């Protein structure tokens, strides 16, 4: 019998947004692209797959479908507050790709309001210090699990 996978918020989140076109839809919406045809063009997603991803993101409360025309009925997609909270995830994914995949030819550069190119980092909201592996201690709260895996019988 196959053992159950580790309970994890990362896995739960990936179940909703971990597919390529879901993340690309979120990228487009965060860039201000809200209409189906333009999202399809900019992501390269096949229309049937894009329709399914948009439906799932709306059902999950990450996007909302907003009417912009009554005749004919037309809709655009907007990030909900939950969807907006995924913005930093997209920024850190982009920063990783810039460093490890596109270091010499970054396809998009974001300028912060201070005038400098954005270099996102994860910090502790309490103290403002950088949050990295060396500064973190893991406390597993899922019953029957340790940091290395399930508790052995």
Image (tube, grey):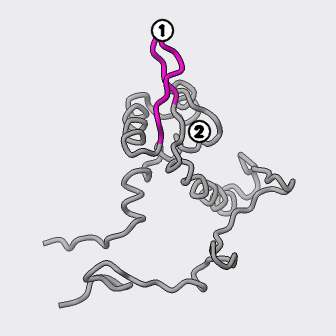
Residue 105 place in picture, x, y as percent: 75, 51
Residue 108 place in picture, x, y as percent: 72, 46
- In the image: residue 108, left or right of residue 21: right
Residue 78 place in picture, x, y as percent: 54, 36
The total of numbered circles placed on residues is 2
Query: What is the secondary structure assignment of the residue under circle 1?
Result: loop
Identify whether 125 is placed above or below 118: below
In the picture as drawn, the residue positioned furthest to the bottom comes out as 153
According to the picture, the residue beneath numbered tag 2 turns out to be 28
* Mark 1 → mark 2, Cα distance in angstroms: 25 Å
Query: What is the secondary structure assignment of the residue under circle 2?
Result: helix
Mark number, residue 97: none
Region of the chain picked out in magenta, as a range = 63-76
- Location of residue 134 (image quadrant): bottom right
Confirm whether the magenta stretch covers residue 69: yes
Quadrant of the drawing holding the C terminus: bottom left
Identify whether 38 is placed above or below 13: above
Identify whether 105 is placed above or below 123: above
Q: Main secondary structure of the magenta part?
A: strand
According to the picture, the residue beneath numbered tag 1 turns out to be 71
Quadrant of the drawing holding the N terminus: bottom left
Which residue is nearer to you in this view: 153 or 84? 84
- In the image: residue 112, left or right of residue 134: right
Mark nearer the viewer, 1 or 2: 1
For the residues labelled 1 and 2, say whether their Cβ atoms are less than 8 Å apart.
Answer: no
Residue drawn at 62 percent across, 77 percent down: 131
């Amino acid at each position: 019998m196959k053992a159950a996978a580790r309970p994890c918020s990362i896995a739960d989140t990936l179940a909703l947004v971990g597919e390529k076109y879901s993340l690309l839809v979120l990228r487009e919406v965060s860039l201000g692209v809200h209409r189906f045809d333009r999202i399809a063009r900019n992501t390269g997603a096949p229309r049937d797959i894009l329709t399914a991803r948009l439906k799932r993101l709306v059902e999950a409360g990450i996007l909302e479908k907003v009417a912009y025309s009554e005749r004919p009925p037309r809709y655009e997609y907007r990030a909900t507050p939950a969807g907006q909270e995924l913005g930093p995830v997209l920024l850190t994914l982009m920063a990783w790709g810039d460093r490890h995949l596109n270091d010499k030819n970054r396809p998009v550069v974001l300028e912060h309001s201070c005038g400098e190119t954005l270099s996102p980092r994860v910090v502790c909201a309490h103290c403002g210090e950088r949050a990295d592996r060396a500064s973190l201690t893991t406390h597993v709260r899922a019953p029957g699990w340790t940091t290395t895996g399930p508790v052995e019988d």
